[in-house]
Amino acid sequence: MGDKPRRPIRQKVSRMVMIILMTALLVTSGMGLLSMFRIRRQGESALVGRMENEITTLAKDRAELADTVLSGYAKDVDRFAAFVEELYKKPEDYVKKTVEPPLEANDGKLSLQLALESEVYKAEDIEEEAELLGNVEQIFYPVMSSDDGVITSVYVATESGFMLAYDTQSAIKAPFPYSSHFDRDWYNAAKETGGTVFSDVYQDLVGRGLTITCAEPFYRENGEVAGVVGMDILISNLYNSVVAVDLGNDDAYAFMTDSKGNAISPDSSATTIDDDPELDEATRSAIRSGETGVKLTDKGFYYSYAPVECTNWMFCTHVPRSYVLEPVKNMDSAIRILIFLFVVVFIAVIVCMTVVVRRFSETLTKPLLALGEDAKKISEGDLEHQAVIHDNDEIGDLAMRFNEMGVSLKSYIEDLTKVTAEKERIGAELNVATQIQADMLPRIFPTFADKAQYDMYATMNPAKEVGGDFYDFFMVDDTHLGLVMADVSGKGVPAALFMVIAKTLIKNRAIMGGSPAEVLSYANDQLCEGNEAELFVTVWLAILDITTGKGVAANAGHEHPAIRRAGGDFELSVYRHSPAVATMEGMRFKEHEFELGPGDSLFVYTDGVAEATDANNELFGTERMLAALNRDPGATATEMLRNVKTAVDEFVGEAPQFDDITMLGIRYFGGQ
């Protein structure tokens, strides 16, 4: 074979195939790059234009909503003022009503209360006028009784030196029979303008929070100002109903400013637009102009703004430009991937065509048929068969490869036998790993036999041989019990290994002392180091004083716990979460104080409970979970978990378990 001249068949077609392939690749890549840059430019322009329109429309719509809400309050105040003027004009048409000063007995009930402007004024001097104005209760009541908590008080403040306030806070004002109004901004502004006014934001004198007042004067028959009707509007509730809006990004938010540029917000530390470092002077001027529009600041933030017509306020939104252009970046990546895939597929097609041309070449027909027969014998199990080498070319090389393949197949079968045995060994080791993981979780119940203050039980059912969920409980000291419920992202062995590390870090740090937030901050920083797999863990961590029932919890992206008060039903305890542990170094976590009384119960769990799925892909959900808990609210900790697991199993039926299911229940008996 070595004496025969070599005539490689590949040389006969390789040149043409290479020319076609290179030309196709160059054309495809060039067109792809041009298309990518064109689409990116068009996409960026379209996204920016659409976002500007959307946030401008949002600001305008929200400003109109605020105007509608505030105009409604203004109309109510105008109606109140007209009614009071009618009282002064036709006092004979109304029955006099005695109005008492604030009484603690009226706390929590809508009641009309009398307060003098100062010690200079005497109740007997204004008794007749106060009894006439006592009729305002009939017009105040429909507004206050139907309000959703935004209005905290309505009142009539008179030039005669007394005020009639209609609200539910008698106990707060009871120790103070005097309420000065002559020096209040809303009173003087209403008198000066002669119409309906809205005050700037101020701190309510009786501690109800940041407030604005809508006020309007009323007059006697001779045209003299007799006083002012006022309505106090609580900023926190007004903010939630009018201002608060989800813009789809943590750095995007909406806000409203008053006539001085102060932020209308329930946060008492909120600043003015002059203190906003992300605003430039041009944008500040535009916001103060009272017009509708949108601007991009030199700091890279979009601000849209629109006036609230019935006031001098402005509704604004703040959106980072990076958030607007994020889809463009994603589009770039997608286009590159598509171009790459197109090139790969095109190359594959060319290779296939080349193989077809070679196969049907007349010079290859006979050797290929012979090789086919050789391949048949090998495929039938004759691994000792040797193909005949006809010529010193690629077909001859192929025949040699066939012979080598027979040897390789024989070796492969032997290796496969070994691999199968190895897989069986790995399966056995996974079973051992399952047992090891189960042994790591505390499973001795009842726990801590010398602690009679509570009854506790916990379970963990992994979706695979090993899972990422875990629970833990341990005594931090003689009187403080640590409780942990956590869920590692992902499943299987990686999640189980991450679980072991997280569990160990949290427990060891908690036993050293410190608050739940400090423990999670420490565990977060440790887990972020070398976290190449980018795993994270949601954690609910609480430290409970078993002698008092008082506890502190930190929730890092975990499910809301369920609490049952003695004699009541289980309800979710909802409060703001912190981000999950191991998502970013240096994070700080929020804490939440709670207290368990004798007979109270606490139930914590992972998302495998609420997200258990039946054959129709319907989720079990927290409502079914609460229903399962409330079937027997007074159950022991063991029965509590058994009831939930039974409800989940009945709901899921024959559907496979999708996620780990981990639960912990505790009944508190009180300090002993």
Image (spheres, rainbow, N blue to C red):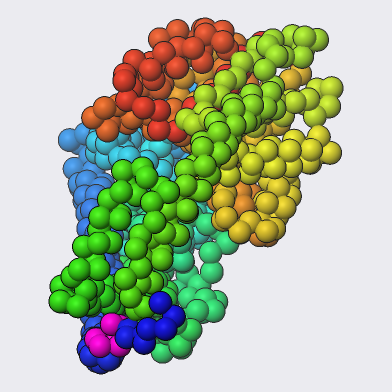
Q: Is residue 655 above or below residue 210?
A: above
Magenta-highlighted residues: 9-14
Between 295 and 415, which is closer to the camera in this rendering?
A: 415
Q: Position of residue 239 (x, y in %)?
A: 39, 54
Q: Is residue 12 magenta?
A: yes
Q: Residue at x 41, y 89 (%)?
A: 282
Q: Is residue 152 left or right of residue 140?
A: right
How many marks do you count on the picture? 0
Q: Looking at the figure, which quarter contains the N terminus?
A: bottom left
Q: Residue at x 35, y 72 (%)?
A: 396
Q: Is residue 127 left or right of residue 17?
A: right
Q: Position of residue 489 (x, y in %)?
A: 52, 45
Q: Quadrant of residue 218?
A: bottom left
Q: Residue at x 69, y 58 (%)?
A: 529
Q: Position of residue 628 (x, y in %)?
A: 40, 15
Between 119 and 445, which is closer to the camera in this rendering?
A: 445
- Viewer can see residue 311: yes
Q: Looking at the figure, which quarter contains the C terminus?
A: top right
Q: Is residue 53 above or below residue 298?
A: above
Q: Residue at x 37, y 45 (%)?
A: 382
Q: Is residue 275 above or below residue 250?
A: below
Between 500 and 477, which is closer to the camera in this rendering?
A: 500
Q: Is residue 177 left or right of residue 113?
A: right
Q: Is residue 174 magenta?
A: no
Q: Is residue 389 above or below residue 536?
A: below
Work out which residue is located at the far front of the displayed protein and give it: 3
- Viewer can see residue 285: no
Q: Position of residue 40 (x, y in %)?
A: 29, 83
Q: Is residue 314 left or right of residue 309?
A: right
Q: Main secondary structure of the magenta part?
A: helix
